[in-house]
Image (tube, grey):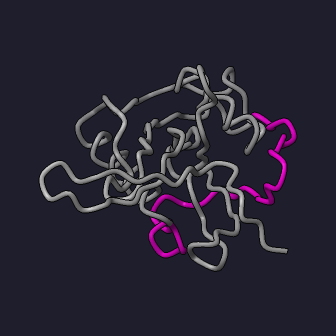
């Protein structure tokens, strides 16, 4: 069954300020993404899920929408708990990108916040997932050096390379 109403995306138009051309774009909630590294800093925890833009499954860093009125860091910990079962007490926030970045300003208003967290101990056993309605994903610890060989998205590669750069710089 094809649905015509959109739940998260709002289609909008505006006139270009100098040319008068009608511009089409999606008004969308802001979101978070987070690279989770293990205690040894050799692996990262990725989620694997189906994505319609890819018409298949992708490995990605945990990510999700920020609820209305929610602080981005609170959203990050909520998404980590929902998707992976790890709680705030299990993790150390080691880096927060200074500002959110526009995903693709040519067609969406969405800003994405980027975080890097480290698992306090590899012996921690996560609680069960608490997925949102319609989510179907699993998690997998992947060696950091192997991530780029997997089908991944841009935010995952960005955070992975940001982590490598910050590690060289000493955070």
| Left or right of 23, for residue 121 | right
Q: What residue is drawn where x is 47% and y is 56%?
A: 156
**Residue 148 percent location from the top left of the image:** 44, 70
Residue 134: in magenta span: yes
Q: What residue is drawn where x is 66% and y is 56%?
A: 47
**Residue 159 percent location from the top left of the image:** 41, 49
**Residue 29 percent location from the top left of the image:** 54, 40
| Left or right of 165, for residue 159 | right
Farthest residue in the left direction?
18
Of residues 104 and 166, the one drawn nearer to the viewer in this rendering:
104
Q: Quadrant of residue 75?
A: top right
Farthest residue in the bottom direction?
55
Q: What residue is drawn where x is 56% and y is 42%?
A: 36
Residue 40: in magenta span: no
Of residues 97 and 21, the one drawn nearer to the viewer in this rendering:
21
- Identify the image quadrant of the C terminus: top left
Above or below, 99 relative to 137: above
- Identify the image quadrant of the N terminus: bottom right
Of residues 65 and 68, the one drawn nearer to the viewer in this rendering:
68
Of residues 115 and 147, the one drawn nearer to the viewer in this rendering:
115
**From where the camera sits, is residue 120 visible?**
no
| Left or right of 143, for residue 95 | left
Above or below, 26 relative to 148: above
Please count the marks in the image: 0
**Residue 53 percent location from the top left of the image:** 56, 73
Span highlighted in magenta in the image? 124-152
Q: What residue is drawn where x is 12% and y is 52%?
A: 18
| Left or right of 115, for residue 4 | right
**From where the camera sits, is residue 62 visible?**
yes
């Amino acid at each position: 069954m094809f649905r015509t109403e959109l739940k998260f995306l709002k289609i909008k138009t505006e006139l270009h300020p100098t040319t008068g051309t009608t511009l089409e774009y999606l008004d969308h909630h802001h979101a978070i993404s987070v690279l989770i590294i293990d205690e040894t800093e050799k692996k990262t925890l990725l989620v694997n899920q189906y994505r319609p833009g890819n018409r298949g499954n992708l490995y990605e860093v945990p990510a999700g929408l920020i609820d209305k009125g929610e602080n981005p860091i609170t959203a990050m910990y909520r998404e980590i708990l929902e998707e992976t079962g790890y709680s705030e007490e299990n993790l150390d926030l080691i880096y927060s990108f200074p500002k959110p970045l526009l995903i693709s300003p040519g067609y969406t208003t969405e800003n994405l916040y980027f975080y890097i967290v480290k698992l306090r101990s590899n012996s921690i056993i996560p609680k069960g997932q608490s997925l949102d309605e319609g989510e179907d994903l699993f998690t997998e610890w992947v060696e950091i050096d192997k991530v780029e060989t997997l089908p991944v998205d841009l935010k995952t590669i960005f955070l992975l390379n940001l982590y490598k750069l910050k590690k060289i710089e000493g955070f």
